[in-house]
Amino acid sequence: MISYSWTPQLEGDDLDQVLALVTAASEYDDEAGFAQIDPADVASVGTTGIRVLHLPIRARRDLNPIDDVPLVVVAYLRLAIGAGGLAAVSYVVHPDYRSRGLTTLLVEQLGLDVDAAEGWDRTGASALRCWAYSTHPAAERLTRRFGVGAIAEQWGLARPLSGPFALPLEAPVPSAGITLGAPRALGADIEDLVRVLDSASVPQAHRDRLTSDLRRGTGVIIDARDETGTVLGFVWYSTTTTIHLELRAAPVFALILDTAATGRGLGSTLLAAAMIDQRDNPPAGERGAQVSLLRINPEDQAAVRMCRLLGYEQEDSDTCYQVGHTDQPAPVLG
């Protein structure tokens, strides 16, 4: 019923069909907040320390049993295999082929044996991790059926910026000796941001992922500096909106502080500045955000308290699942 083959690089028709699939899935899943795959990841190849493998999954169009019906890409799986064989899994099914048993069939055929000499399905992966966003019901059913355990959680928070449920939002006043920069587009020069990341108290795996995201990302940055001009922290967000529960929503991607700058109210100051910019300064031809969205680690009590004081409320939760064992700690996002 399905066919597939691992490849280190997608090309030709496979690349075109997978790009079309992830684009269709992103549009379909956008409002629900489910995990999405960046088209840049589809076209990516491995880098130093990371080996990438792609798995386009094909079936007969409309799952027709007749042999002369053409094969089309109905799902896509990507592995990014890093240190010690730990692989980050990204996976998506085309919206037209969901709830038809394809994922269950794929797992049954591939199995979940990560202890083989050549790793899972001879990919070299000795452990698999995958995030399921917004309490995806299909992920819950699948992981329960195959006994896949959860190792980490993050919360999705929302904060109304306008309308009857929005709390007052005033321009933040930095503490003495701190200056907030004007909102600026994220550009190629991110060395100050990387330096803050290197001095922040975040796990190395999260630091590496965020550094990579910043290098290829877009959006807006507001930074905070001391009297010498040294960057002490920054907030990275977008003013471009998507529809979330019928409202215009814009995400906050990250809020990072130098460890030495914590405990001074700087995080609240930066986050409030980002929310005001999301509400009041949309891109040309658009309207301002009605809701600000972000994700946090629920075990970070200081972050939870700060977000609640600023009016954010939990809307959903995301779960990280893992197959196999690794010495690397559970991921911390948000």
Image: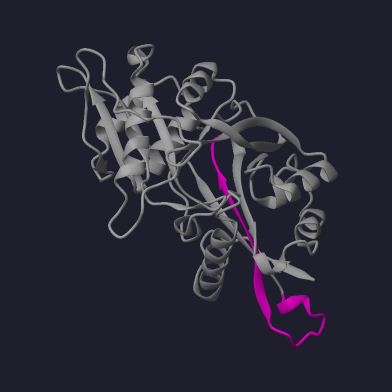
Q: What is the x, y in percent for residue 65?
A: 82, 80
Picture residue at 29% right of the left edge, 46% below the top: 281
For the record, the magenta segment spans 60-83
Farthest residue in the front direction? 164
Q: What is the x, y in percent for residue 34?
A: 61, 49
Colour convention = one colour
Q: What is the x, y in percent for residue 134?
A: 64, 43
Say whether residue 79 is magenta: yes
Picture residue at 75% right of the left edge, 88% below the top: 68
Q: Is residue 46 above or below residue 221?
A: below
In the rendered view, does 45 fall on the left or right side of 186? right
Farthest residue in the left direction? 228
**Residue 325 can be seen, yes or no:** no
In front of the other: 245 or 14: 245
In front of the other: 254 or 72: 254
Where the N terminus falls, by quadrant?
bottom right
Picture residue at 64% right of the left edge, 45% below the top: 124
Quarter occupied by residue 76: bottom right
